[in-house]
Image: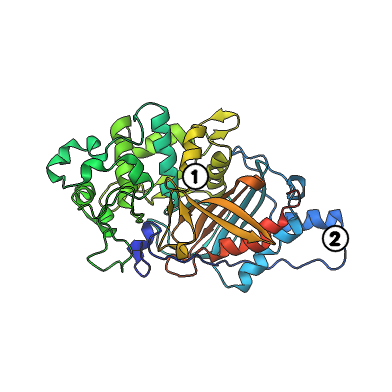
Amino acid sequence: MREGCKISHRLGLAAVFAIAISGLAPATSGAQGPLTQMTLDQRNLACGSPAALDDGWVTASPESVGLDGARLCGIAARLKEMEADVHSVVIVRHGRLAFEQYFSGYDDPWGVPEGQFSFDASTKHDMRSVSKSVASLLIGSAIDRKLIAGIEEPVVKFFPEYSALKTSGWDGITLGHLLTMSSGIAWDEARAWTDPKNDEPHLGKDADPIHYILAKPIAAPPDTVWNYNGGGPDLLGNIIEHVTGKALADFAREALFEPLGIKDWEWKNYENGRVSTAAGLRLRPRDAAKIGQLVLNRGAWSGRQIVSAQWIDESVRPRFQAIGYFGGLFYYGRLWWMGRTLSGNKDVKWIAAMGLGGQRIFIVPELDLVVMTTSGLYGSGRQGHAALDMMANFILPSVRDK
């Protein structure tokens, strides 16, 4: 996904390889002198006390889950100082929703004219390429249900009607290669949106994008080169529909969202009418945080195993260096990112789902922590900096019971 074109904002992550700082919020003034417990409680209520909604989250104060609420209250001022465009910050610790803040700012929501918006706990937000990580969970669920034999299944098996397109090398491409973006398909999203050599626009504009993807030549042997590719997740979404006999959204509702108590969501279609598996999901931030908690719990939610622990473990195991993206500092698993943050002298590892504009779900297993942020910096090279800045300077240092 490239910056600089409005339609490109509807899709995935591929365009801007940097991570950004953003947000518009009123600064929270600091207390003078020693903070009493009453002062802390009042300050937390003012800056990040979670709303009491009937959505399955147990809420808590930051201090009750080992977080420094006063430090977290510095996030808003930091975002304002940076003149960023962060729309939400949601923090979950020990399985409890302990902190949430929402701000106003620019956004370009799918299907709605761009402009200035106010956000709160009830507002759905584009997830962009976070959708890819959710698609990985759905593939895992389909395998758990024996609807798919496994990731070794050849991709072409699910598209017999396109067999005449098959070029040399396609027989060797499996679902596993699509999940790790190592299929070797000749694919380039790292171009201007208007460049005719950019493959990504074809996903939304072509009448038959599956034909477009399956007709692409194979440029490298599978499992040898990592290359960001939104076409692979879209193939996976079509495979889910093939094996379940249901629309992707219907299977997602049954297999994932209903068990998680997620009721207010959308999975958008491209302008050609095809579901955008790679980028079309819209969720409330605190519901997106449930996706993170599900991964942190190795596929379980409220005592119920929704996706197998084995699938989660295999999905978040690093398989490739993400060369060319975010400075090549991150690793890639099965449609999930892996990275790390330096907090003090501690190197803290995390798992993440990442979407264009600064949409992030961070999962920090060693600290039993989930962080979700949304942002509107779709065309900026600074997108995502805010999330990493908050992690390094506010959220991770706020953990008191390491």
Q: Residue at the location (76% across, 45% down)?
A: 64
The quarter in which the N terminus is drawn is bottom left
Q: Residue at x 41, y 48 (%)?
A: 132
Q: Nearer the viewer, residue 1 or 374?
A: 1
Give the farthest residue toward the left: 164
Q: Residues within 10 Å of mark 2 (few under 14, many from 20)?
A: few
Name the amino acid type tagged 1. Val
Q: Is residue 13 left or right of residue 94?
A: left
Counting from the top left corner in percent of width and height, residue 397 is at 70, 58
C-alpha distance separating marks 1 and 2 = 40 Å
Of 283 and 363, the residue lying toward us: 363
Q: Position of residue 328 (x, y in %)?
A: 45, 62
Closest to the camera, between mark 1 and mark 2, is: 1
When the figure is inspected, residue 382 is found, relative to residue 250, above or below; the finding is below
- Residue placed farthest to the top in the image? 146
First in sequence: mark 1 or mark 2? 2
Residue at the disc numbered 2 = 35
Residue 388 found in image quarter: bottom right
User: Percent from the top left, x then y, of residue 312?
Assistant: 49, 38
Badge 1: residue crowd in 10 Å (few <14, some 14–19, many ≥20): many
- Measuring 75% from the left and 48% from the top, which residue is drawn there? 401
* Image mark for residue 316: 1
Numbered disc 2: secondary structure: loop
Q: Which amino acid, mark 2?
A: Leu
Label 1 element class: loop
Residue shown at the point (42%, 42%) measured from the top left: 136
Rendered image coloring scheme? rainbow
The reply to whether residue 245 is visible in this rendering is: no
Mark 1 and mark 2 in contact? Answer it, CB < 8 Å.
no
Q: Which mark is residue 174?
A: none
